[in-house]
Amino acid sequence: MVFACFLLSLSLKAEPEQAPNYKVATEADDVVTRVLFDAVAEHFGVSIQYVNYSSFDAILDSVANGESDFAANITYTSERALKFSYSRPTNIEYTYLYGLNDATLGEASVVGVPKDTIYAELIQQNYPELLQVPYQGHEEAVALLRSGQVDGVVDAINQLKPMLLEGFDAKLLNDQISIKPVSIVSQKGSHLDELSTFANFIHDESVQKHLREQVALYQFELRQTALRESIKRLPIDLEQPLTIKFESIFPYVVYKEDGS
């Protein structure tokens, strides 16, 4: 009996510890969240489960209610700080003006802004003359643009893919409005050690470089795909050879006097 108990004790001690598992709330095309937490998972040997939500409000609610452990790309506000614990800032959120043409905020008169986000305040500070129309979710944003009610809508990089594939242009706004740094959040009082540990790791220059490279690649691939889709919609026969003439831009494109 004693020998059997001894063997059982050895067996229990020999069992490897299970890696911690965390649920991260995100939207379907939030590339920044996935790049950051994929790096965290690889470095710390933890398991990350991404849980997709339909809106930013739903993401915040899931963390506040304890359904998810973390959410990334969250701007600090005193009101949110009552419900969430914040890490130190981890990155700057990539923000765009989506529209039917490559316009800027300075050229717009009316813009759509997602409800319950920091964008309304930032636009009011930097472009007080702009009329703002609040919206909730991708479908409402597209409806505002299609109907002509707004000149553009402001939103984060997670909307880049669906907006480009819808045929809209995307103008990066990080140099037009003072985008505040964003953080990782958890339910108030929970995962405090992880918030500190993960944020310190994300601040490493190698991680920040990896994030910049992955976002640049993501943007390039999306714009390439959107361009190909737009060409398919043109009234041309893609089975026939195409003749393309480039704009004369020295030293990249130079034409002779005969036009060749």
Image: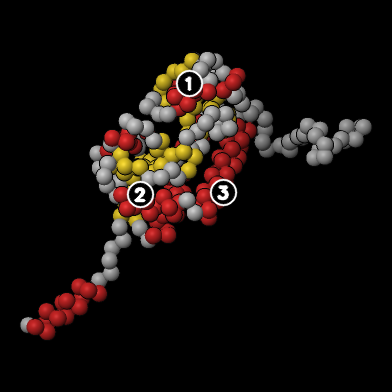
Structural distance between the alpha carbons of marks 1 and 3: 31 Å
Tag of residue 124: 1
Q: Please indicate whether residue 20 sits to the left or right of residue 212 in the image.
A: left
Tag of residue 195: 2
Residue at x-position 37% and y-position 27%: 116
Q: Amino acid at mark 2?
A: Leu
- Residue 136 position, x and y percent, is 38, 25
Residue at x-position 67% and y-position 33%: 237
Res. 248 in view: yes
Q: Residues within 10 Å of mark 1 (few under 14, many from 20)?
A: some
Return the residue found at the far right. Answer: 257
Q: Amino acid at mark 1?
A: Gln
What is the number of callouts on the image? 3
Tag of residue 229: none
Q: Please indicate whether residue 126 sits to the left or right of residue 75 in the image.
A: right
Mark 3: secondary structure: helix
